[in-house]
Image (cartoon, coloured by chain):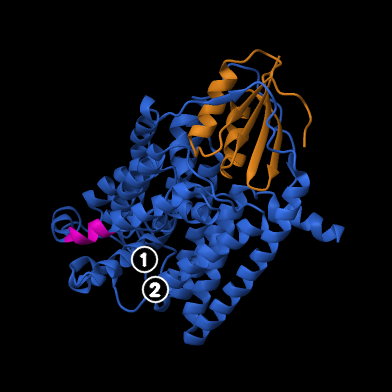
Amino acid sequence: MSVLSDFRKRYLVRFWSPLPALVALGVASAYYFAITGTFWAVTGEFTRWGGHIISWFGYAPQEWSYFKLIGLSGTPLDRVDGVMIIGMLLGALCAALWANNVSLRWPTSKRRLLQGLIGGVVAGFGARLAMGCNLAAFFTGIPMFSLHAWAFMLATVGGAWIGVKICLLPWLRTPLKVGSQASTLFGDAEGTRRRATVQARIGTAVAVLAVAFAAWRFDASLVLGMAVLFGLLFGGLIERAQICFTSAARDLWTTGRTRAAYGILLGMAVACVGTFGAIALGASPKIFWMGPNAIIGGVLFGIGIVVAGGCETGWMYRAMEGQVHFWVVGVGNVIGGTLVAVYWDELGTSLALPYPKINLLESFGPASGLLLTFAGLAVAMLLVHLNARRFQSKRSPAREPGQTESLA
Amino acid sequence: MSQAKPNLSLDLRGEHCPYNAIATLETLETMQPGQLLEVVTDCSQSVHGIPEDAKAKGYNCLAVEQHGPLFRFLIEVPR
């Protein structure tokens, strides 16, 4: 029993380090591309959900140019992206339950909820304008060797700067609750343990349900079944390691954090090796227009994710942990993405469609395209490192932080 | 759970990033060398963020504890 509880504490409760998790996500996303023929992406599917809702009101969104572009046939259960997202949500829920980390958490004020909704709408709109979010136009877009993902990534970091300025406006700050006595919230260790047992059982039930769901989709097709399994892995990993793309972009401007940014860049580097191999074997990469849409979309996305406090993958696992704020952010994302679909005839013809789709592997040749991508990632890492130096204090460098103690 | 007695306790339940990290650093700024700050959050993300930021600013993060959905940090202002 003690071996089991030791294992639980070490791997299921204590959070994993983001850097190796991001590298694992990079490897997994390359396999996902090779197996399903599409990249790990979520916002396109969120927009399709918006399309389904619109069709309930008597409209015919399947006739709209944007949905002709991204497809709107069947239901989420028949689509690779759809079942993968269900897998992600189940994986994140399961991981959070096993860690005794599911609890309804209410935001400090209604203002925060409004902030989450507006941020979510802006981020969803920006993401779909650029044909992807922190995944398809960034983490899995750069390993497609599509130039637009580079523009989106840099624009997102720029937009995050504006987002930080907005977030720190005085009327978005809430008064701090400071006391002079140690918190009394932690007296009931026995209660925490009982709660952990209940959540672990529910978590196991969710895992069984997830496996049954995967088996059902395997029955429909190999690709759909694999998409569920990858979704479970993606969702479980981002929750367990608390992967936050928003933090990687935002905290370049607030406190100079480096770990998440290094992890993302390294993850993309290993993903590039895998996707390069898959493309060499005949898979066709997803390349999008290098137009103003990628830059404007990136800036809006950067502003939106910082204001909302989380991006399209961030809200998914936080919503599963019971953070009410991020349910609202998710709704905002769907609304924002759907707005792009509504106005695509105007937006697309002016900002995206006239511009070329630039594939680095074709423009520079496969070897040079790959090398150029690695060089770009290396330069980005160097910039993150140099940026962190702006925030180093004049205090003597601190000792290593204390060991994490898990009592859940 | 660490039993050291904090000088100040900051309750950040309900706040998400970046507010919890920024509020922690702002409170630490007001404290004297040798004093201890307890921070309570319910945002899992802060488990990575708060220790990294505190350490980068030269503070000593003495404990990071998970109590189910609540997280507790003890941070010392160096002497």
Magenta residue span:
A338-344
Task: From the image, tell me which residue sits under label 1.
Answer: A45
Describe residue A33's horizontal placement relative to residue A130 as left or right: right
As rendered, which of A30 and A131 lies closer to the eye? A131
As rendered, which of A249 and A31 lies closer to the eye? A249
Instruction: Tell me if residue A223 comes above or below residue B30 in the rendering.
Output: below
User: Which quarter of the rendering shows the N terminus of chain A?
Assistant: bottom right
Q: Secondary structure at mark 2?
A: helix
Question: Disc 1 to disc 2, how far (Cα)?
Answer: 8 Å
Name the residue at 69% across, 19% down.
B7
Circle on res. A267? none
The answer to the question of whether label 1 and label 2 lie on touching residues, with beta carbons closer than 8 A, is: yes
Task: From the image, tell me which residue sits under label 2.
Answer: A76
Q: The numbered mark 1 sits on a residue in which chain?
A: A
Where residue A163 sits, quadrant-wise, is top left
Where residue A184 sits, quadrant-wise, is top right
Question: Residue A11: in sight, yes or no?
Answer: no
Q: Position of residue A20 (x, y in %)?
A: 62, 52
Name the residue at 50% across, 59% down.
A271
Describe residue A325's horizontal placement relative to residue B40 as left or right: left
Identified by mark 1, the residue type is Glu
Q: Position of residue A304 (x, y in %)?
A: 35, 44
Per the rendering, the colour in which chain A appears is blue
